[in-house]
Amino acid sequence: MENTSSDNWLMIVNPNAGVKKGFKDWPKILEILKEEGVDFEYRLTESRGHAIQIASEVVAGGSRNICVVGGDGTLNEVLNGIMTGKDVSTSEITLGMIPVGTGNDWCRMFNIPFDYVKAIHLLKQKKTFMQDAGKVTYFHDVNKVVRYFMNVAGMGYDALVAKKTNILKEKGIGGSLTYMYFVFASLFQYKFMDAVIEVDDKIVFKGEVFSMNVGICKYNGGGMMQVPFAIPDDGLLDVTLIKKTSKWMVVRYARKLFDGSLVDLPIVATFKGEHIRIRSTGKLYLETDGESLGHTPFVFEILPRCIKIVTGK
């Protein structure tokens, strides 16, 4: 049985986060937690997917305050461990974060500092916010799979770049600059794909697509604002679609990915809805919160205000 004190935190620590920054910085974070008088226990992840198992176990054991010491991928795993629990309402659990990842995009949305001392002060203040979560059903070969996410899901080119970046991260190589390298280096091997997009049972697009994002929050890819209209508690999914375009045009307007102005381009369309279906002629691949997953067809659903998070806003 885990400690169920209202002030006790269970730290789920990913040593491999941030290309092993978690391993390097955990002793420093551990010392700050002790100096700040934080009441905590901790578990270290050992492999990809392990944080899902840990989160599920500690919630079943009584933990109600969980802090991720990792990046967006670790946060995604912990979310999935929480969401798959059957006996505890997700609204009973408070989820915090000390960011040690490469992108830390979810933290950008909620003004969670990258400075460890400031992030821990925020944890102690425990100012909370109820945010939406997304649920996506996809396929891995012939098997239907469900995954939850709390930041941004990407498809098409976005998923290809994430996959290439993740392969290097698993070898201990990479970071935000690696992601940007693949944004450009992968352009001329990518093939456009026909897709049909439905929002709330209405077909909003048919044709060739370059990239798509479905967002709860605004940022992904290490500070890119690809879903600038996303509001994390409005009960709606936000879609940004980049249609087929010249690959040189992608290079020309890449800077617009960072300030949200990409949505002003004629090749970009945006939609909002509670329920999104995407199907394609071939396999269109998916990533959620930076984690590479499976392929089309996809069904996205919104889960309104179901996750209580510690926020800096």
Image (cartoon, rainbow, N blue to C red):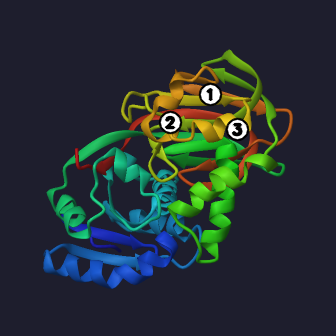
User: Residue at position x 58%, y 63% from top?
Assistant: 178
Q: Which mark is residue 276?
A: 1
Q: Position of residue 268 (x, y in %)?
A: 60, 25
Task: Decide if residue 161 is on the left or right side of residue 195.
Answer: left
- The C terminus appears in which quarter of the rendering? top left
User: Residue at position x 50%, y 36% from top?
Assistant: 256
Q: Earlier in the sequence, mark 1 or mark 3?
A: 3
Amino acid type for the residue under numbered disc 3: Trp
Q: Is residue 299 visible?
A: yes
- The N terminus appears in which quarter of the rendering? bottom left
Q: Which type of secondary structure does the marked residue at label 1 adopt?
A: strand
Q: Position of residue 92 (x, y in %)?
A: 31, 50
Q: Position of residue 171 (x, y in %)?
A: 64, 77
Amino acid type for the residue under numbered disc 1: Ile
In the displayed structure, 50 sits above or below 229; it is below
User: Residue at position x 52%, y 73% from top?
Assistant: 19
Judge the density around disc 1: few (<14), some (14-19), many (≥20) Cα neighbours within 10 Å: many
Foreground: disc 1 or disc 2: 2
Amino acid type for the residue under numbered disc 2: Lys
Q: Which residue is mark 2?
A: 256
